[in-house]
Amino acid sequence: MSLNEHSLQALSWRKLYLSRAKLKASSRTSALLSGFAMVAMVEVQLERDYSYPPGLLIAFSACTTVLVAVHLFALMISTCILPNLEAVSNVHNLNSVKESPHERMHRHIELAWAFSTVIGTLLFLAEVVLLCWVKFLPLGNPRDATDGTSTPEPGISPGVAAAITSTTIMVPFGLVFIVFAVHFYRSLVSHKTDRQFQELEELSNITRLQNQLDHRVETGTLPPAVHFP
């Protein structure tokens, strides 16, 4: 095997391990967050005596449904592709990397990674905010212990205050998450670009050296071998 082919196979093996790690992380994250979303949908207790805003209920239902659908889609991609990568990576043979579908399914792997880590996480943050509003909004003014009647107080109710507090905390955190995701993606793309340029330069140097060696062999200009007694 020439040096050029060896370098190409090493690069393909690195891509295989990276794709396998992404699919494993996507499957674990998607299973965890979709389970939390389903538990939140089932365990939330709506107050029968309180008139919820229709927009809040629609937003909560739509966000939960989209969140579960996105994570299940990422989980499905990971479940379908990951066994094929595991089967190839467990074979201790350099040529077995050609049987792996990680390069052909590269777009699907990146789609599962984006759905699980970026879109799914943002939807989960929105789910937490909406859940706080649904849970705390019915909590009005405290009731009097003597006659059970509510004592109106000026200003907002404790439930609305709790929901506003959670929203105030979560919105800056969501913005920080978006900024970090964009910065991380740009840094990763820049790193991949630099690595590809370096690998192309290394392959070019290897090809040039191989051509020089082949030319010397053809012309017979190689130095004679030295034999030691």
Image (cartoon, rainbow, N blue to C red):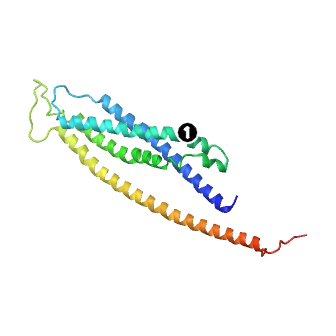
> Along the line of sight, which residue is nearer the eye, 49 or 182?
182
Where is the C terminus found, in terms of image quarters?
bottom right
Residue beneath the point at 45% across and 58% down: 188
Residue 127 x/y as whole percent: 30, 40
Residue beneath the point at 24% across and 38% down: 59
**Image quadrant in which you'd find residue 75:** top left
Query: Which residue is under mark 1?
Result: 83
Q: In the shown orientation, is residue 96 left or right of residue 174? A: right
Where is the N terminus found, in terms of image quarters?
bottom right
- The amino acid type found where label 1 is placed reads Pro
Q: Can residue 194 be seen by looking at this rendering?
A: yes
Residue beneath the point at 35% across and 32% down: 38
Q: Residue furthest right?
A: 229
The correct choice, above or below, for 94 with respect to 161 in the image is below
Residue beneath the point at 8% across and 40% down: 154
Residue 39 x/y as whole percent: 35, 31
Q: In the shown orientation, is residue 94 left or right of residue 32? A: right
The correct choice, above or below, for 34 with respect to 22 in the image is above
Residue 12 x/y as whole percent: 58, 53
State the SS at label 1. Answer: helix
The correct choice, above or below, for 14 with respect to 48 in the image is below
**Image quadrant in which you'd find residue 7:** bottom right
Q: In the shown orientation, is residue 229 left or right of residue 224? A: right
Q: Residue furthest front?
A: 218
**Image quadrant in which you'd find residue 35:** top left
Residue 79 x/y as whole percent: 49, 38
The correct choice, above or below, for 180 with respect to 167 in the image is below
> Along the line of sight, which residue is nearer the eye, 116 or 40?
116
Q: Can residue 131 be seen by looking at this rendering?
A: no
